[in-house]
Image (cartoon, helix red, strand yellow):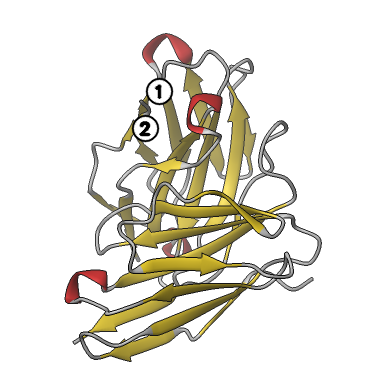
Amino acid sequence: AQKVTQAQTEISVVEKEDVTLDCVYETRDTTYYLFWYKQPPSGELVFLIRRNSFDEQNEISGRYSWNFQKSTSSFNFTITASQVVDSAVYFCALSAPSNDYKLSFGAGTTVTVRA
Amino acid sequence: GAGVSQTPSNKVTEKGKYVELRCDPISGHTALYWYRQSLGQGPEFLIYFQGTGAADDSGLPNDRFFAVRPEGSVSTLKIQRTERGDSAVYLCASSLNPTGNNSPLHFGNGTRLTVT
């Protein structure tokens, strides 16, 4: 069985603050993929990043960065210098061969950035 | 280019009625997925198509739910005898191919179904 846990339900920050979203996953597979998606108020799920289980190198894309720690089964996401447009629900997801690569999503973290 | 298109964006229906939700995937994407998202939850898998056939329908909650993709492109999710518990946002996604290099899923805006 596979499971994704996002312990933070809601986070509220003031603009320009950094915000880190936690994601912990469970899977019995040794090969798997991790994802982050953003869901703004419009409702569309926007793909942000995909990492495979063999690549633990952290990644930075503009104000976004991701910290993959296989030892703790975590794939955390940090938004640096947050902006109002970052307000959205963020989902962490996992896919693995034992589940036919179907995406399993966490419950999501609602981020509110106040001006 | 055009993304995944879902129609209608909103659907209100009475309990017991039949509804159809449509999904137009990105052109050339062979894999198509339906997910359901209840309020405050992450999307949950319903069914996945590879081409015209349903490769995995293990997420369909019961036999009132059915989906087709007759020509390997547009898909329709059909719900019979709707119940209030079916109220949710139904999301469609497509990808270039479903396994192996694990292409990311591209989602549509969803159809918000409300059963009164």
> Label 2 lies in what chain?
A
Q: Please state which of residues B40 and B92 is positioned toward the viewer in this rendering.
A: B92
Residue B69, image x and y in percent? 64, 67
- Along the line of sight, which residue is nearer the eye, B8 or A89? B8
Can residue A87 be seen from the camera position used here? Answer: no
* Res A62 → quadrant: top right
Give the class, few, some or many, for how many residues have Cα within 10 Å of label 1's Cα (few <14, many ≥20): some
Which of the numbered marks, if any, corresponds to residue A74?
1
Query: In whole angstroms, how far apart are the C-alphas of marks 1 and 2?
Result: 6 Å
Determine whether A52 is above or below A18 in the image: above
Does residue B38 appear in the picture of this structure?
yes
Q: Amino acid at mark 1?
A: Ser
User: Is the residue B54 above or below the residue B103 in the image?
Assistant: below
Quarter residue A22 falls in: top left
Task: Find residue B37 and report its horizontal and vertical position in percent.
Answer: 35, 61
Q: Secondary structure at mark 1?
A: strand
- Residue B31 left/right relative to B110: right
Who's the residue at 53% across and 28% down the image?
Answer: A96
Q: Residue furthest front?
A: B63
**Picture layout, residue A6 above or below residue B74:** above
Q: Which residue is mark 2?
A: A23
Percent position of residue B116, x then y: 18, 87
Q: Position of residue A81 (x, y in %)?
A: 47, 48
Judged from this view, the residue extending furthest toward the top is A71
The answer to whether the residues at label 1 and label 2 have Cβ atoms under 8 Å apart is yes
Amino acid bearing label 2: Cys
Picture residue at 44% right of the left edge, 70% below the top = A43
Q: Nearer the viewer, residue A78 or A27?
A: A27
Co-location on one chain, circles 1 and 2: yes
Q: Is residue B96 left or right of residue A23?
A: right
